[in-house]
Amino acid sequence: MKDQIISLLAHRDYVPANVPELLQLLQLAPNRQQELQVVLKKLEHAGTVARIKGNRYVSPREADLIPGRIRMNRSGRGFLQPDDPALKEIAIAESATGTALHEDRVLVRREVRRKNFRTGDQENGTVVRILERRRTQIVGTLQKSKQFLYVIPDDPRIPHDVYVTPPRDVGRPARVGDKVVVELREWESRHSNPEGEIVEVLGAPDAEGVDMLSVLRQYDLPLHFPRAVLAEAHAIGAVVAEKDLAGRLDCRAHNVVTIDPDDAKDFDDAICLQRVSPEQWRLWVHIADVSHYVQPGSALDAEAQKRGNSTYLVDRVIPMLPEALSNELCSLKPDVDRLTRCVEFLIAQDGRVLHTKFHSAVIHSQRRFTYAQVLAVLQGGAASDPIGQMLQQAHALAQKIRRLRFKAGSLDLDFPETKIRLDDQGKVLRIEKNENDVSHQLIEECMLLANEAVAARLMSLRTPAIYRVHEEPDARRLQEYRQEVLAHHVPCGNLSQPAEVQKLLHKLGGLPIGSALKIGFLKSLMRACYSVEPLGHYGLAKKKYTHFTSPIRRYADLVVHRALFAPGSAQKDSLKEIAEHISVTERNSADAERDSKDVKLYAFLRGQLASGTPQKYPALVTDVRNFGFFVDVPGLAMSGLVPLSKIEDDFYVFDEARRNLVGRRTRRIIKLGDQITVQVAKVDAFKKQVDFCLAGEPRALPPSRPNGAGKKGKNKFPDAPAARRPKSFSTPSRFHRSPQGTKPTR
């Protein structure tokens, strides 16, 4: 019936019909009307059909309705990522988002394109229906007015406070100021506040553990595995069984090693390099064979798919698989046998891949290296032991492969990463800076080769699979960014040509304002995601790319392993749903990871303010506006605003043509790319904002929460429109490697 309905609605002579009329058009018996309604509801929920005025059904395209997932920014503006990958992103004004929340699936009516002479076409739309709520619960702070209780959401992308009734049967009393979890009820109009019911009281915001518990609840991250999942994991056993070795390539005599962060626990990749001849190398890339233990249809598989990926918060890991697998039987630990899926490369001396093979294998890792240990080997002169020599040879080969990659158009988007170290009380102990040095690059180039080789193999076999895709940037965004670059008198070519992008990024590397403009370029890019269509990877300049190298922590990789070694195990329709789901869980985890860092940093910075002697930090001016300037503070892995109201040495005037601030008396100029020193001036955990001031300038006192603040219509930042105020964010990087050993997420 589903196919019949879709075919009927797509017919050129079809006229929008209601349920009784569809019953006749489909030549169905009257007693099948209820069945028809059920199917129509499912199709409508999926965005395959649309219900219009008069409860008549049409193909969404016929009514210019586009189903997709909406993403909101802090100003309330939305961006629709259509289900159809052939369609471009659609912008949705704050007034046109209806009752949509971040990551909801919605139906959007596309408006007529408006031509902009400077930036090209801009597609806009209006949300007409919510197809699926991404979240049914929110976390926030309980407040009370004279008449009612309400909750201020922690997520600034929810623009309304939520009215609640006094909580009942939640285990503990709720006090004003407590963090609570609210179950949302139906929300029908954006002109009224949503309502909800308190289902859990987490406690006072400054109570021990409440900050991280709030993050866990907000992003619906599970703390425990179901019993059935744990039972399956433990039933597998703790050692590789002899029967599991049948048909596998025995690589246990090879010098296989792992390279990971110092606190990693799950080792899902390993490498070995062997010289074949003076002009050729054999590179083995071994990946943990999770698919051998996690079978389709099992409780383990269902839970892994539901979670989508592991989540690495600042103080804990929410793993995709139980520790019996992720940290033990699947982890490629040294001195024990482990099962792998292997890509064997024959590589020329100049770094070109000559031939590729794929194996099911067994290894016995010889040593577990940290990045620091590998770097010491690479910088310590000629190694005398075979494994040290192998690492030095692998480094030399990896650098040749890397140069070929950039020659082919790959973009250099590396930024230093930061890691927050906590003490035993969960407070910030120190913030470390991790450079993408040659030890990281050694393993990265091997993993990129494997991902590309597997994608090429799957495409040649035409096997349904999931690909890692990074689409080309929107032309309008690139043009806007180009205008920004030119406004700072930096020569810039046509950025629709990758070669021109490479030239610009290289040029920015040698300019004082380079880092600031490079951050701007990252913001103009599309976000990488998963798709059943091999759309290629813009940032890596690869037409064939997937994720194969981290099946312990990414469900996508597990699916790819099955597709490569057990083709036919999944249908394209089901894979499309999985790709959409894990794209969402990946974004959810990224947001949770960022917020987990933020809550610790906010507490750390509030402590500095309370001490009266806040620390000073080097900072980079990344944007200049008429109300102040934004800075990136690498030492804190965050950005913030220096409002003009916090600078009292002069009155500053914004020069829009030159995009800088000029002091009337001192003639001091503040411009993009300036290196300055700042200290924290204000921390507002409610709004998730941090203000800075120039080091030595007068500072504001720690903020108190005004009664009713955060209500719809209130300006969330007194010095500037809320729409112009971005959230603090971690210094961006091209890939993220977690403390527990995650691999490139590109």
Image: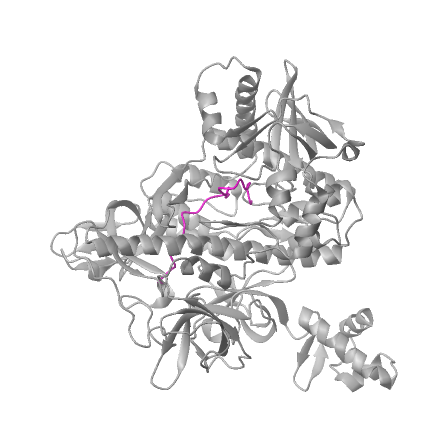
Q: Is residue 299 left or right of residue 744?
A: right
The answer to whether residue 115 shows anywhere in this view is yes
Q: Is residue 415 left or right of residue 656?
A: right
- Image coordinates of residue 258 in percent, x first then y, are 57, 30
Instruction: Give the image quarter of residue 248.
Output: top right
Residue 557 versus residue 160 in the image, above or below: above
Look at 61% across and 20% down and name the residue there.
Answer: 349
Look at 50% across and 65% down and name the residue there.
Answer: 115
- Image coordinates of residue 55 in percent, x first then y, are 69, 84
Locate the C terminus by quadrant. Answer: top right
Residue 699 versus residue 715 in the image, above or below: above
- Image coordinates of residue 280 in percent, x first then y, are 65, 18
Q: Nearer the viewer, residue 127 or 263?
A: 263
Residue, far front: 171
Q: Nearer the viewer, residue 285 or 228?
A: 228
Give, as a single range, the part of the protein colored magenta.
725-746
Residue 734 versus residue 144 in the image, above or below: above
Q: Is residue 333 magenta?
A: no
Locate the N terminus by quadrant. Answer: bottom right
Look at 23% across and 50% down and name the residue there.
Answer: 614
- Image coordinates of residue 130 in percent, x first then y, are 59, 74
Look at 59% across and 52% down and name the residue there.
Answer: 529
The answer to whether residue 330 shows anywhere in this view is no
Q: Nearer the viewer, residue 257 or 224?
A: 224
